[in-house]
Amino acid sequence: MSDLSSTTSSVFGHRSFRQYWLARVASVIAYQMQGVAVGWQMYELTGSALDLGLVGLAQFLPSVALVLVVGQIADRYDRRLILRWCQRTEAAAAATLAVLSVTGAITELALFAMVAVLGAARAFEMPTQQTLLPALVPTSLLARAVAANASAGQTAIVLGPALGGLLYFAGPATVYGVCAAMFLTASILVGRIRMERIPARREPPSMASLFAGIAYVRRHRALLGAISLDMFAVLLGGAAALFPIYARDMLLVGPWGLGLLRSAPAIGALATAFWLAHRPLQSRAGRTMLVAVAFFGVATIVFGLSRSFALSLGVLVLLGAADMFSVVVRQSLVQLGTPDVMRGRVSAVNSMFIGASNQLGEFESGVTAAWFGTVPAVVLGGVGTLLVVAVWWRLFPELVAVDRLESVAAEPGP
């Protein structure tokens, strides 16, 4: 019997979704472990806040260069095959870093190069994962599937950095080697997913179809508001790139402390994701997103001023919980408000915005920390997030008006 025809009310009652969920956990754990190792190793090699920011830029630039191509490919080819090749490429990059670390040939340029390869692979992987999700569960369960999918990512973000920080004591090569193995595991799990929904017919390639994802997002003000709000808020308020500086120079903890700092937001996000998977937002989803992003900004300010490791961890947990409300609302609008024939291109635009908020945000943090100092950079970012929320509340009344996520409907595809 098809997974999609099952009457179960649990998303985990669908075998394909279970395979998908486990693959996501494996790949994100590997990505987070690699992030800890690269950040600490780069700071050891250079001691530069700017170089920590450039790591984020190296990951972001491929997503900008590939955004139009990614959407077309995700909408036209077997999405499982795309994911498998992405994860194999990520495994190869991690294995290369392991070899360079063992031989002592590792340099900051080698780190930048492999991070750029990872960014290119993730430019394809992230939107393809998102477009695959609606084919694995009935539409009535999609909001819960989005929350459960988010819980997979947050589970991995809890485990990955902590595990990466511990394994780093055995050397960066150990971390990179384990990452390569986990990327390959994710590739195997994706290959076991069975697609039973017949794909919709695709329109022939054209210049209009190439830019269709951007045009679709521009036409739908609530969707544009949700994606851009998340981008600018995290772009300004994100401080993850500076965690190595806080861990080593301010909070006086080692790689294990850096791992805990990177895991803390995911603990709050994971708890929120599990809550929303069982008790989805029933009303005022748009307003809830805006309030949650404002709370994110306040938490960022408190973290920037903290000199207590315990307080910093607690604030980051609350920050992650607030961010998860934004993630679930935004992803639900993308998945429920986009026809399947357009989902790859719209998800590619969404992923570019996410990359801008995360990787470009890391670059922004590194630059402002180099200019003004680490603490002023983080505090100013939190204040900037609050200003963005105030502007977006007035600029996008369509987002404020979003009530029940289940009532969002996609317009017919081309």
Image (cartoon, helix red, strand yellow):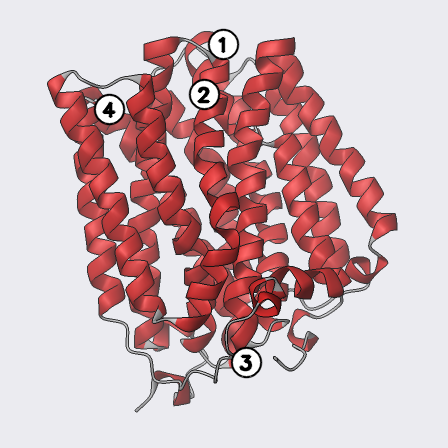
Q: Is residue 262 above or below residue 140?
A: above
Give the quarter of the image for residue 301.
top right
What is the residue that sits farthest to the right in this orientation?
A: 394
Residue assigned mark 2: 52
Q: Name the residue: 40% across, 76% down.
A: 136
Question: Gap in Å between the C-alphas at discs 4 and 1?
Answer: 20 Å
Q: Name the residue: 29% across, 42% down.
A: 30
User: Which label belongs to residue 168?
Assistant: 4
Placement of the C terminus among the 4 image quadrants? bottom right
Q: Is residue 240 above or below residue 265?
A: above
Residue assigned mark 1: 250
Task: Tell me the amino acid under the disc marked 2.
Answer: Leu
Q: Is residue 93 visible?
A: yes
Mark 4 vs 3, N-terminal side:
3
Please rate how many residues cluster around mark 4, counting C-alpha atoms within 10 Å: few if below 14, some from 14 to 19, many from 20. Answer: many
Residue assigned mark 3: 140
C-beta proximity under 8 Å, tags 4 and 2: no
C-beta proximity under 8 Å, tags 4 and 1: no
Question: Gap in Å between the C-alphas at discs 4 and 2?
Answer: 18 Å
Task: Tell me the amino acid under the disc marked 1.
Answer: Met
Question: Gap in Å between the C-alphas at discs 2 and 3?
Answer: 43 Å
Tell which of 364 and 120 is nearer to you.
120
Task: Tell me the amino acid under the disc marked 4.
Answer: Tyr
User: Which label belongs to residue 92?
Assistant: none
